[in-house]
Amino acid sequence: MATANPASVTVDDEHAIVDSLLPNTCMTASPYEHYHEQLRRINIRSKQKECKTEEDHVRNIARHYMPTIFVMNLYAAFKVFFTMLLNIESLLALALTVGFTLYGYHMVLLQEEQATQLGMEYNWNGTLPTVLLSFAVITPISSSITMAFTRRENALVSLAKFRSSAYNLYLGHATWDWSQAHKNKGRRGCVECKEDLAAVYGDETKNDVVNGDRPIDFMQHSETLLRQLIQLSDALYVYLTLPSATRAIQRVTSRGRTEANQIITCGRSLFTLNVNGRMILISQLCEALKHRGMPGNEASRVRQWEEFMTNAMESLRNVKVYRTPQALRSFGRLFTMFLPAFYAPSYIQVARDTHSLPFGVALGVVTTIALTALFECVRQLEDPFVNYVTLDGIDVREELVVLLYQELMTARAVTFPEAGEFKLKSDEYTISISGRGRTFNESVDADSDFDRTSRHKC
């Protein structure tokens, strides 16, 4: 910790303190060109050139002729349909529909033959009203798709707020200065407090500080915040990608309830400890800046970004835990599976009118596949965070583990152009806690880091 009172530093010591500042210890509020500002501009311009080359390349490879686009889109649509929308429920519904249609068609032929032998006229009309199909299947499925897609969009908004707040929070801690012209030095006037150094590093550090004053390394402060933000986003990613605990079998069966209880317990531990717990550590870093002189209005803005992050995480948790109505999903599942088979008389009537049994069976197959595929769309949107299962889900790993990490690393490179390689954690470290006459020494293994490579990287 450090004192923020610049008056404690004499005029004669100011130049010595400024000259002894370590590289990248603080950002300056000066509007004039200086060495670090030139490095930042060079860094940004080099990245712009790289992006321009990649932009030209992707624009060239994205140009296709219209016939090529038509064929590729048709192939992609069939592949998505047969690989993602067809499942065991679809096969069972198809078997029931085809079986009922074939059985009913041959029964009608048999009855017609018997009536002809008896000299009777056989009039059979199997056309059924479609209002039941629309009311019992289409309406609940369309409502479920609307609700599921709305939840997905709300989750995307929450993710955007979380990432934006984390990015601005880092910039506030790393770059904001509270200096005033000819009045105080702001970050440059902050020196370490000897009592705080002794409390953190031990009494022996009192003699290590030259002239009793040591400038604060604000880059170390920013690195601490950066580690907390990255670990926070990693923990949120782990929580959001946990298995679902709100399926029907997890509500009405004993084995499913046991499974759901274990998943919920694990999820709560991850969320409260790794997610909410780290917000306390981030909040303490704001208190450190206030102790070093950050004005109350700027600290209030930092607190607001912390609140935005907390609200976004709570919104994501609600989307993860609470789903669309379970009764509506069960209703849609049963009727999409069994109702098409009860419309077999209508398919038989079409086959008799067209004198083509294959056409009648094909109509039943198309109707069944259309209904079951619609319900599969609902099922895949129920948990928008499990991207490896769905096509339209949210790629949480890409958003939190990869993209947010890259944004923070870019901000770090621009803010501290001479900074070395960033290390999230050391392999092993030791905790020593002294208090109330007892000393605890514990060796802690750091968590393994995530793979930060984007799945879109060529």
Image (spheres, helix red, strand yellow):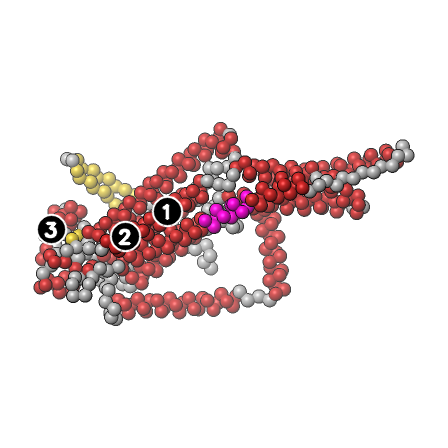
Q: Quadrant of residue 406?
A: bottom left
Q: Nearer the viewer, residue 299 or 221?
A: 299
State which tag comes first along the sequence, 3 or 1. Answer: 3
Say few, some or many: other residues with alpha carbon within 10 Å of mark 2 (under 14 / 14 to 19 / 20 or more): few
> Which is more toward the observer, 85 or 345?
345
Q: Is residue 5 visible?
A: yes
As drawn, the label of residue 206 is 3
Residue with the mark numbered 2: 300
Q: Amino acid at mark 3?
A: Lys
Residue 444 percent across, percent down from the top left = 27, 42
Which residue is at a point 16% across and 60% down the rendered structure image? 189
- Label 3 secondary element: helix
**Residue 311's mark?**
1
Asked if residue 348 shows in the view, the reply is no
> Which x, y percent locates residue 184?
16, 61
> In the image, which is nearer the foreground, mark 3 or mark 2?
2
Under circle 1, the secondary element is helix
Q: x%, y% of residue 403?
A: 40, 55
As helix, strand or loop, the secondary structure at mark 2 comes to helix
Q: Where 342 falls versus 180 (above or below)?
A: above
Query: Of helix, strand and loop, which mostly describes the magenta segment?
Result: helix
- The residue located at (32%, 68%) in the rendering is 41
Q: From which residue to which does the magenta span run?
A: 144-154
User: Which circle's residue, 3 or 2, is located before the other in the chain?
Assistant: 3
Residue 424 image point, x, y percent: 31, 51
- Left or right: 34 with respect to 92? left
- Give whichever of discs 1 and 2 has the lower sequence position: 2
